[in-house]
Amino acid sequence: MSKAGFSTSSVGRKVFMALTGAFLVVFMLVHLTCNLFVVGGAEYYNAMTHFMGTPIIKYALQPVLALGFILHILFGLYLAVKNSMSRPINYKNANYGAASSWASRYMWLTGIIIFGVIVLHMANYWYKIQIVGGVENDYELVVNLFKDSMCYTILYIVWFVILGVHLAHGFWSMFQTTGQAYVKWLPCLQKLALAYCAVVSLGFIFVALWCRFIA
């Protein structure tokens, strides 16, 4: 198969989704690590945001990771529309349980929800801190958005659960799609995916609840 043929084939599209999905996996773990600094108080959190605003992070690392998962989401939506207009792309048949089957069928839906809340999140945090500037205390901005609205806190918690479902399926299927996982390794990868999902989802939920009730 030629390079052009591979890139336009169903296998090529799945590989592209898997590779860009890896950016989402890494990005969320890095983002969670940064968010956990809020537990240390204003001094630690503001020091972290100051470091994340340094040129090498702001203009090199962040754009690369962000571009990867934005391409993942947009290309996923493109495939969902394309498939709905023709025939769905059938993933490799295997008995991974009802939860995984549901997650695989509705990856496009969870992806849309994730993308929508990311836009809201960037408008509330990233745009104000990185683009507009003039925010004297990043810690207070983050904490007050949760303290001032219970609905906002609930929205984020629901989003983190949906994000966890999306990542749990995408994590192990990423290896399957790229040919790195064999049948005997799939159960191990599924457990690793669930562990990753739990750490990311519960970690973000903890941050939201901490900002709302403790900070």
Image: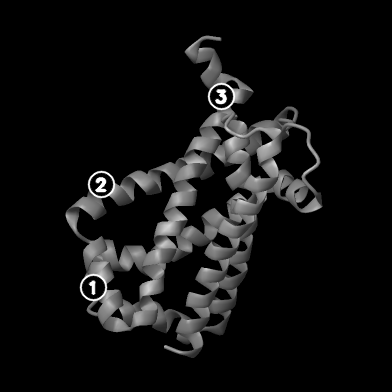
Residue 102, image x and y in percent? 76, 50
Kindly report the distance in space between the C-alpha atoms of the residues bearing marks 1 and 3. 42 Å
Whichever of callouts 1 and 3 sits on the residue coming sooner in the sequence is 3
Residue 69, image x and y in percent? 46, 46
Q: Residue at 34% across / 81% down in the picture?
A: 40
Q: Secondary structure at mark 3?
A: helix
Position above or below: 24 against 1: below
Q: Residue at 48% across / 39% down in the picture?
A: 20
Q: Which residue is mark 1?
A: 47
Q: Residue at 49% across / 85% down in the picture?
A: 212
Please give left or right for residue 41 compared with residue 81 in the image. left
Q: Secondary structure at mark 1?
A: helix
Position above or below: 185 against 120: above
Q: Residue at 27% across / 68% down in the picture?
A: 49
Residue 52, image x and y in percent? 26, 61
Seen from the viewer's position, the closer of residues 152 and 54 is: 54
The 10 Å Cα crowd at callout 1, few under 14, some 14 to 19, many 20 or more, is some
* Res. 12 mark: 3
Q: Secondary structure at mark 2?
A: helix
Name the residue type under label 2. Ala
Q: Which residue is mark 2?
A: 60
- Quarter of the picture containing the N terminus is top right
